[in-house]
Amino acid sequence: MSDRPPLPWTTATIAAIGQATTRVKSFRFDGLGARHRAGQYVEVRLTAENGYQAQRSYSIASAPGDPAGIELMIEALDNGEVSSFFDTVAEVGDAIELRGPIGGSFVWSPEDGGPVLLIGGGSGVVPLLSMVRARAQSGSEAPMLLLYSARNAAEAIGRSELLARSRDETGFDLTLLLTREGPTAGRRIDRVMIDTAIECLGLPRHVFVCGGNAFVSHVSNLLLDAGLKPGTIRTERFGG
């Protein structure tokens, strides 16, 4: 266990709010201070007038050093204490307590090189989006492929941006799997998709998988079955 004290809480201001999908809002914050690495997250703490506190962790979507401030993508969850506040109450100018950036293993920097295979499920694409943006921001030519599974096009976070990047940026490819609409309805990421991704990308030097517990376990097993070394695979799991 680390003996380092926890990072201090700081007050950041909501600088902008946008609608990312039907259930996800984008929040830009000024005032975090420390520069993050792609893949890291922050903790958010809300305090009620009676002193009750609620705390949640959210991955950072923006590229490191983005002049627009750090971006969090927050999904409205049923009975979610923190997400409900951001969905229905939060406004530009509100002061929010943040702590971070946090995380040292699920991170990628352009100097780490590639090929890089990113696999995300649902909102698990958020830290991977930061990596995609970091690659573009730096002008890196590291081969990168994102395999992204979402229920439908309307719920695919960053869909338009990712499609544009896959069209315009050399070395970046996107495979978007829609599990509840279109020709891929009812399909989940399988061994054929993994093999096709590796064939397109080349043997990946780094693999990042992010999503719900079941999704990450399923994909990790497929990657191991495909012959990838465990040391190349890094995972980030959400509850559920």
Image: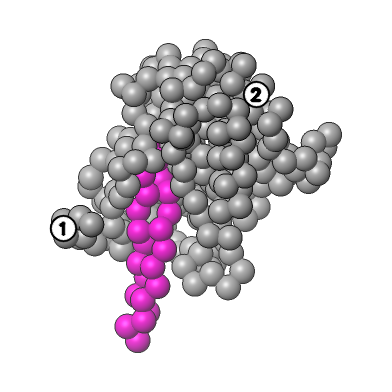
**Residue 174 located left or right of residue 153:** left
Residue at horizontal 46 percent and vertical 43 percent from the top: 235
Give the spatial CA distance, label 1 vs label 2. Answer: 42 Å
Give how far across and how far down residue 44 sits, in percent. Answer: 36, 61
Residue lying at 30% horizontally and 50% vertically, measured from the top left? 102
**Residue 86 visible in this rendered orientation of the protein:** yes
- The residue lying furthest to the right in this view is 183
Q: Pick whichever, 218 or 23, lies toward us.
A: 218
Q: Amino acid at mark 2?
A: Asp
Q: Which residues are magenta?
A: 38-61
Q: Please tell me how many numbered marks the rendered image carries.
A: 2
* Residue 46 painted magenta: yes
Residue 153, position as x, y percentages in the image: 71, 41
User: Which residue position is annotated with label 1?
Assistant: 3
Examine the image and state in which quarter residue 79 appears.
bottom right
Picture coordinates of residue 56, whole percent (x, y): 41, 63
Residue matched to label 2 = 195
